[in-house]
Image (cartoon, rainbow, N blue to C red):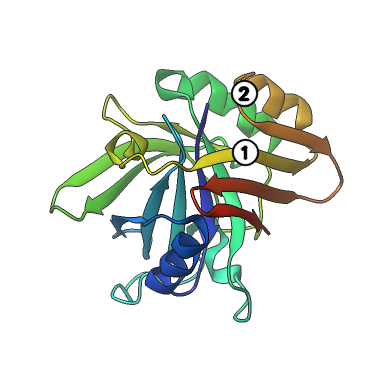
Amino acid sequence: MIDHLVYLVHDLPAAAERMGRALGVDFSPGGRHLDRGTHNMLLSLGPGTYLELLAIDPANPAVVAPRWMGVDALPAAAPGRLSRWALTVNERIGPLAAQLEAALPGAGQVQAGSRALADGGELRWQLTDPGSAPAVRSLPFLLDWCGNPSPAARLPEVGCRLQMLRVVGPYRTLITTLADAQDPLEIVDGPGEELVASIVGPAGTIYLRD
């Protein structure tokens, strides 16, 4: 199933305030990816799914470009960019990662991930490489939460839902195989790569794109 969407921003608190106001909700604190040079804030999109706002962490200058998720490619004048999306596959990550690798060399490499939590703890997981390039990637990366509750399970229910994720790119057949039939996906064949999401909240609907 769709685990989360990654929306890149420059100023994390300002973006969370702006988007939260449009939806009529508050984003939750996330944490810092100490080995990636980014930090995040999160929003529940219903059971098992969430929106991640991701920005370069100004308090971690030790990690330099190119950072993951295409975060360094966000234009200075852009308010944000929907750059990546992820599927929860858990213990199936090995064989499914091999399918990603066959479609896009490098995309199926399984890595360890971690994030420092706001409460001082640490969340660990495994994921396939989301890459630092291209700026937008239509092929999802895969997540195994290693028996831990995903961030979606920790977030408060605020009445937001992912209405639709439109995925344009050359991987339609593979994405159809990887995703669940009930995922709100529109998968379109195309030579370029594009992601567009519509999210509805108590105060209205927002559209996120590349």
- As rendered, which of 123 and 108 lies closer to the eye? 123
Where does residue 204 sit, x and y in percent of width and height?
57, 53
Left or right, 169 with respect to 43, comes to: right
What residue is disc 2 on?
A: 178
What residue is disc 1 on?
A: 163
Amino acid type at image mark 1? Gln
Up/down of 52 relative to 184, above or below: below
Q: Name the secondary structure under disc 2.
A: helix
Where does residue 71 sit, x and y in percent of width and height?
53, 65
> Between disc 1 and disc 2, whose residue precedes?
1
Where does residue 191 sit, x and y in percent of width and height?
86, 47
User: Is residue 97 at least partly visible in the picture?
Assistant: yes
Q: Name the secondary structure under disc 1.
A: strand
Tell me the CA gap for discs 1 and 2: 19 Å
Sort mark 2 into few (<14), some (14-19) or many (20+) by Cα contacts within 10 Å: some
Query: Between tags 1 and 2, which lies in front?
Result: 1
Left or right, 18 with respect to 136, comes to: left
- As rendered, which of 190 and 78 lies closer to the eye? 78
**If the image is split into quadrants, where does the C terminus sit?**
bottom right
Answer with the quarter of the image where residue 136 lies.
bottom right
